[in-house]
Image: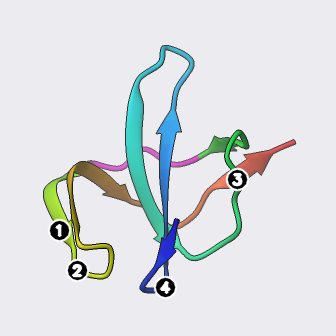
Amino acid sequence: MNSGGYTYVEAQDEKGQKTWLALPELKVKVGDSIEFPETPPLANFQSKTLNRTFEKISFIPGIRIVK
């Protein structure tokens, strides 16, 4: 989902572990395979534009969509 100049992505690794990512706005589709840098997550981040609080979210510079 896009909001406030960011794209918010809920990614799932091969073990089924889910994590939220925030990055500069771009087009990504549900089901796309992505690669992204590991960054420490922020806890209890409140997005005012989404009117939502994320338990954990990592702000990253971007992702690579794997074809």
- Could you tell whether 35 is left or right of 13 in the image? right
**Three-letter amino acid code of the residue under disc 3:** Arg
Of callouts 4 and 2, the N-terminal one: 4
Q: Are marks 1 and 2 in contact (CB under 8 Å)?
A: yes
4 or 2: mark nearer the eye: 2
Distance between the Cα atoms at labels 1 and 3? 26 Å
Distance between the Cα atoms at labels 4 and 2? 12 Å
Is residue 40 within the magenta segment? Answer: yes
36 versus 52 height, above or below: above
Is residue 46 within the magenta segment? Answer: no
60 versus 14 height, above or below: below
- Could you tell whether 64 is left or right of 54 in the image? right
Q: Residue furthest left?
A: 44
Badge 3 local density, few (<14 within 10 Å), some, or many (20+)?
A: few
Residue 46's label in the rendered image is: 1
Of callouts 1 and 3, the N-terminal one: 1
Q: Nearer the viewer, residue 28 or 39?
A: 28
Distance between the Cα atoms at labels 3 and 2? 27 Å
Location of residue 30 in the rendering, given as x and y in whole percent from the top left corner: 67, 46
According to the picture, the residue beneath numbered tag 4 turns out to be 5
Badge 4 local density, few (<14 within 10 Å), some, or many (20+)?
A: few
Name the residue located 42 percent from the left edge and 85 percent from the top edge. Answer: 4
Of callouts 3 and 2, the N-terminal one: 2
Label 2: which secondary element: loop
The magenta region covers 36-41
Residue 48's label in the rendered image is: 2
**Three-letter amino acid code of the residue under disc 2:** Lys
According to the picture, the residue beneath numbered tag 3 turns out to be 64
- Could you tell whether 35 is left or right of 56 in the image? right
Name the residue located 42 percent from the left edge and 54 percent from the top edge. Answer: 21
Distance between the Cα atoms at labels 1 and 2? 6 Å
- Report the number of numbered marks: 4
